[in-house]
Amino acid sequence: MIWSRAAAGLGLLIALAVAPAPALAAAPACAAPAPSATQPGYLVADPACGLDGTPFTALPGARVHTGIVAGAAYRIEVPGAWNGGLVVYAHGYRGTGTTVYVDDPALRSHYIARGYAWAASSYATNGYDVGQGVRDSVALPEVFRRVTGVRPKSVIMSGASMGGHVTAVAIEERPRMFAGAMPYCGVLGDTALYDYFLDANVTAAALTGVPIEFLRRPPADYQERWRAQVNRIAPALGLPTGSTPAGRTWSAVVERRSGGDRPGFDSAFAYWNSAPSLPPLADLPFLFGLYPGLQGGTAGIAPGNIAGNRHTVYRSTDRLWPTAAEWRLNRDVLRVKRDVPADPGLSGVPRVDGKPRVPVLSLHTIGDLFVPFSMEQEYAARAARNGRSNLFVSRAIRGVGHCDFTGQELAQGFDDLTTWVRTGHRAAGDAVLNRRAVADPAFGCRWTRGTHRNFVAPACPVSAKP
């Protein structure tokens, strides 16, 4: 028997040696972006390939499905030993270009290793169109059933940045569809994000004595006018570190508007004020390119101004009563009235009510000044008002970048969320609404795994290290 197998094998080798070599199967060519069937002027990139032309291939033991539905591209990956769970992943803000594309979640390998399938959508539009992100994301479980022939037993919703906003709205719009949710670095406070952008800019102007305006319909030359104003404001603040008296006060105001006194804020302030803003204002310090007055406060999607500060009291200290300097700041700051609130449906900037019916575990870096840590506090406060605090857990990570998480931090969050969903035992988190807890030098130590560049704070106490 052994000889016959060996002989057969030798014969096969000889046959292969003398036979003409077959042509190697060529990898499927990537298709050019296709015109959208639903959004005039939009193109949909081939979901079977990356934007660099690299084919999207399955991880070992898994199988993949790709396609385009209603103008949105999708990817699906199912492990060989599937446990019946599906993760729907919602991506973040992609700018205002007219080509939509789908990519992979950061935890792709972890999902597959844990037996979970995942699905992701490009959305049919770009821009800050959370409503479209929700529509295309909640459609994915049915797409999954159609292409695999099997309905998932449970669905977890997850998303980063704007995708966190999509996640928070999706689980309220379709509460029966999801078993749990994991937003991270998410916009969990809907229009409160734009209030924060407004706060940062109007207080900077007031502290430096530079007059600015907030126009509902900015003229074509307004961007250049704003650039000239910022070029007076920034030196007066001593940016990037805030080295002038006005700069030090502004740093204290931004700290309180972005989450309160907390470890590592000085490094976060310097990091974000050294970073260029988004095009076309990439020559300005980061937060100044986000001034809502540049587009009349519409975020490019709302039917009017969504940012307001008429009743905001700005503080640079934590004293019980405002100081004389704080009263002057509140007297001098430009006040803006909100025209349009967050939308109760999926139009404009959709509202996040803070009424989860399923476990929600969120992560946020405490030095993020793009989508600030205060978004966690906003959601936690709304959940508390609605009697849903038991369904929300927030974890602070000691980093300064936006969505600056290690794989271990995200993986632990996902594993703890799915354990919570499976067992009913609430996962642990941080007391984000406790001002003293947030100001503690060890805040964020419990859940931080690995090193985060540019975050500078005293080392975590040994007792607080993970």
Image (spheres, rainbow, N blue to C red):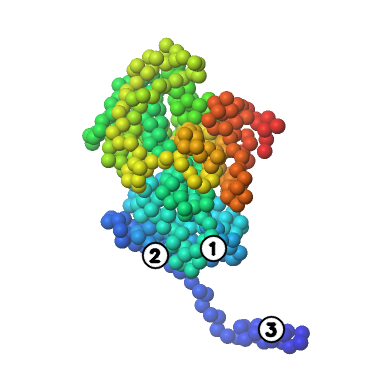
Residue at 53% x, 80% y is 22
Q: Amino acid at mark 1?
A: Val
In the image, which disc is placed on residue 9? 3
Choose top left, top right, bottom left or bottom right for residue 60. Answer: bottom right
- x and y, in percent, of residue 309 in the image: 35, 27
Q: Which residue is mark 1?
A: 78
| For residue 355, above or below residue 433 | below
First in sequence, mark 1 or 2: give its number.
2
Disc 1 crowd rating (10 Å Cα; few below 14, some 14-19, many 20+) is many
Which residue is more in the foreground, 54 or 248? 248
Q: Which residue is mark 2?
A: 31
Residue 2 can be seen, yes or no: yes
Secondary element under disc 2, as helix, strand or loop, is loop
Which residue is more in the foreground, 396 or 175? 175
| For residue 402, above or below residue 68 | above
Residue most extreme to the right: 2
Query: Image check: 322 left or right of 19?
Result: left
Disc 3 crowd rating (10 Å Cα; few below 14, some 14-19, many 20+) is few
Marks 2 and 3 sit apart, C-alpha to C-alpha, by: 41 Å
